[in-house]
Image: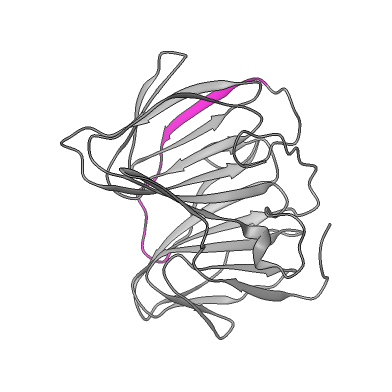
Amino acid sequence: MTVSSEPKLYKAERTDVSRNQGPFRTHFNFPGRALPDHEDHGYGPLATVVESFMDPDTHIGMHPHRDEEIISWVPAGVMRHGDGEGNDLVTDADHLMVMNAGTTFRHEEFTRAGDPPLRMLQLFVRPHSLGLEPNIQHEPIDTPVEGEWRHLFGPEGADAPLFVRNEVDLYDLRLDAGSSVDLPSIAGRDTYFYVFDGAVEVAGTRFGTTESGLLVGESDPTLAAGEDATVLAFLIDPDAPVTRRGTIGR
């Protein structure tokens, strides 16, 4: 349910929820926790934003997911993927991958010894229904243009290169220090944004690397870069029907 009809901005500091498995390390960002007294760690369909680190020559063995949409966003380096369908895929700065896990989807992730250290995001979206058909999408994406939001995924039928099965759109942005741009907006959507690197200011509030903000209610604030920055913005329908049986995001 929408929390307020009045636009309001909430800030979340760097997450303190992490898991260290040696060559594979994760930090879990929960967009719902930006909102005081919000009972759900997610915010509508967006369950979790996971910052992941993989050292060269790291292998995460074959494992299942179900009832969640998993997006792999890799701004530099490579993340290698194999799955039970026989796919052998490389996700990098030029490609985006979406696993629509549905009833179940098994996959493995790895880096090779000659690959660079990897820092990426894995995004977990709750689907609108249980028991959906499993699917995988791996597509080239446009080269980023400084100061322009790049549309990466949206609901089925949206004008985006890839889709998820709920009401979430994702944009990313590279912004030079001293530049500014309006946050993207869609009528009826709230905005969660995550600063992957650099620093920006929104409505007089500074957000540094790995900090995030939740903008509840419709407004069109400007995002200004105090340093060269990379930012992701999720446009979320907080009232969309969701399921909560995913393997990780729930």
Numbered range of the magenta stretch: 133-147
The image shows residue 2, relative to residue 244, as above or below, that is below
- The answer to whether residue 53 is left or right of residue 33 is left
- The answer to whether residue 200 is left or right of residue 7 is left
Where residue 53 sits in the image (x, y, percent)? 35, 48
Q: Is residue 116 visible?
A: yes
Magenta segment includes 144: yes
The image shows residue 125, relative to residue 3, as above or below, that is above
Where residue 127 sits in the image (x, y, percent)? 69, 36
Where residue 199 sits in the image (x, y, percent)? 41, 74
The image shows residue 46, relative to residue 70, as above or below, that is below
Residue at the image position 66 percent from the left and 62 percent from the top: 33
- The answer to whether residue 87 is left or right of residue 155 is left
Seen as rendered, the residue at the extreme bottom is: 204
Q: Is residue 159 visible?
A: no
Image quadrant holding the N terminus, namely: bottom right
Residue at the image position 23 percent from the left and 34 percent from the top: 57
Residue at the image position 35 percent from the left and 26 percent from the top: 89
Q: How is the image coloured?
A: one colour
